Image: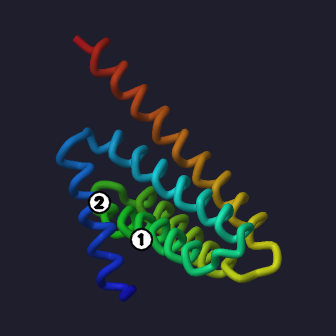
Amino acid sequence: MSQNFQHGLAHNAYRSAAITTSPLAAIVMLYDTAIARLGRTVTLIEDKQFEEAFINLERAVAILRGLCHNLDFEKGGAFAERMRDTYLALIMSALGAFRKPDAPARFKRLIEALTGLRDAWADVRVQMAQKKFTSP
């Protein structure tokens, strides 16, 4: 699958989620999907279904690329730069893990990292909702 095509898929997924839900909810949903794809990648690697595993890995990476490409550096400043660096590190780690003897363990660590980020965004979403309802 070409990189432009993958980027297009990620961008379309992000845009579709953004249209139907709040931006914070969309981010959480995209993390959930990337985590699920990486989890499926682990299962498929363990079952020695490498082609299908790589397809799931590509889809998870496409989501991370989409999140990275949609960062707003004007509004986000240093935070956006740190998120970009984080996404790029996760992408490189994910792609580098494939076909390693300990790939499942590497992907499980990536899933833990993504789950931590996902949970942080979910907490922000809850806090923003509470602030919205408690502000005069």
Spatial distance from mark 1 to mark 2, Cα to Cα? 10 Å
Q: Look at the numbered disc 1 and give the secondary structure of its residue.
A: helix
Quadrant position of residue 9: bottom left
Q: Residue at x 71, y 68 (%)?
A: 47
Q: Earlier in the sequence, mark 1 or mark 2?
A: 2
Quadrant position of residue 72: bottom left
Quadrant position of residue 106: bottom right
Name the outermost residue toward the left.
19
Q: Residue at x 26, y 50 (%)?
A: 17
104 to 26, vertically: above or below:
below
Q: Residue at x 29, y 60 (%)?
A: 13
Q: Quadrant of the N terminus?
A: bottom left
User: Residue 62: which numbered mark, if any?
Assistant: 1
State the image coordinates of residue 50 (x, y, percent, origin top left). Answer: 63, 79
77 to 96, vertically: above or below:
above
State the image coordinates of residue 130 (x, y, percent, origin top left). Answer: 37, 19
- Number of other residues with Cα within 10 Å of mark 1, as a class: few under 14, some 14 to 19, many 20 or more: many
Foreground residue among 3 and 87:
3
Q: Amino acid at mark 2?
A: Ala
135 to 61, vertically: above or below:
above
- Number of other residues with Cα within 10 Å of mark 2, as a class: few under 14, some 14 to 19, many 20 or more: some
Q: Are marks 1 and 2 in contact (CB under 8 Å)?
A: yes
Q: Amino acid at mark 1?
A: Ala
Q: Using residue 117 as the reference point, say whether residue 25 is left or right of it.
A: left
Q: Look at the numbered disc 2 and give the secondary structure of its residue.
A: helix
Name the outermost residue toward the right.
101
Q: Using residue 132 as the reference point, say whether residue 130 is left or right of it.
A: right
Tell me the residue that label 2 is attached to.
13
State the image coordinates of residue 96 (x, y, percent, origin top left). Answer: 66, 81
Q: Residue at x 28, y 15 (%)?
A: 133
